[in-house]
Amino acid sequence: MGFGACLVAASWLYPHLKGVLPGFVPLAARGTARLAGGLLSLRYDDVEVVRSDLLVDGFGVSVIEECTGIFEILIFACAVLPVRTAPWRRLAGVAAGGAVLYAVNALRVAVVTAAGGHSYHRFEFLHLYLWQATLVGLVAAIWLAWWYTIGSADAPGDRRR
């Protein structure tokens, strides 16, 4: 199965997965809010996290499904899984890359929330444009880093053997 087929399968399976594991998305949203809140508390005194809501110096956001990094992780997984290499290399890639994407996404939520406390226009620009493009580039960069370090080691024609 290639990248495109994996994306189609993931887009079909993901809603079913949410039905089987209904607490997964709220758990991811709460975790993202908590991690972002922890990052923000390093800089701000007035940080409050309630479930998946984040409030910093009077400016609040709700971390929803699209803010959890789940979709970026799925896209990354669909880029890694079809690569012809050892299964452990693919699983390690998805796990490590997914963890990095989740952490950077929490940083994104923290930065966007902090910016919103200063300027709503800055919040909108960072939220809708800058960080969206950054995450797309990050997915590609992490995939390339994985490919060049361990992902391609078993690939046919590899000269590193």
Image (tube, rainbow, N blue to C red):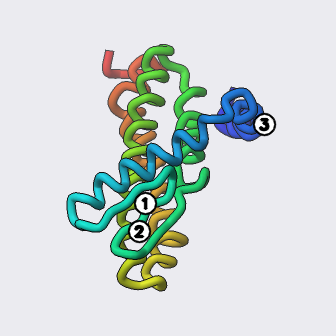
Residue at mark 3 to residue at mark 2: CA–CA distance: 32 Å
- The image shows a total of numbered marks equal to 3
Residue at mark 1 to residue at mark 3: CA–CA distance: 27 Å
Left or right relative to 145: residue 155: right
Q: In the rendered view, would you say 66 is above or below 102?
A: below
C-beta proximity under 8 Å, tags 1 and 2: yes
**Residue 108 x %, y %:** 40, 60
What secondary structure is marked by label 1?
A: helix
The residue identified by callout 1 is 109
Q: Nearer the viewer, residue 12 or 53?
A: 53
Q: Amino acid at mark 2?
A: Thr
Image quadrant holding the N terminus, namely: top right
**Residue located 46% across and 69% down the image:** 60
**Residue 142 x %, y %:** 40, 43
Residue 56 in view = yes
The numbered disc on residue 113 is 2
Mark 1 or mark 3: which comes first in sequence? 3
Mark 3 or mark 2: which comes first in sequence? 3
**Residue located 59% across and 46% down the image:** 71
Q: Amino acid at mark 1?
A: Val
Q: Nearer the viewer, residue 47 or 148?
A: 47
**Residue located 61% across and 51% down the image:** 65
The residue identified by callout 3 is 12
**Residue 84 x %, y %:** 54, 21
Q: Mark 3: give few (<14), some (14-19) or many (20+) Cα within 10 Å.
A: few
Residue at mark 1 to residue at mark 2: CA–CA distance: 6 Å
**Residue 96 x %, y %:** 39, 32
Residue 157 in view = no
- In this rendering, the label closer to the viewer, 1 or 3: 1
- In this rendering, the label closer to the viewer, 3 or 2: 2
Image quadrant holding the C terminus, namely: top left
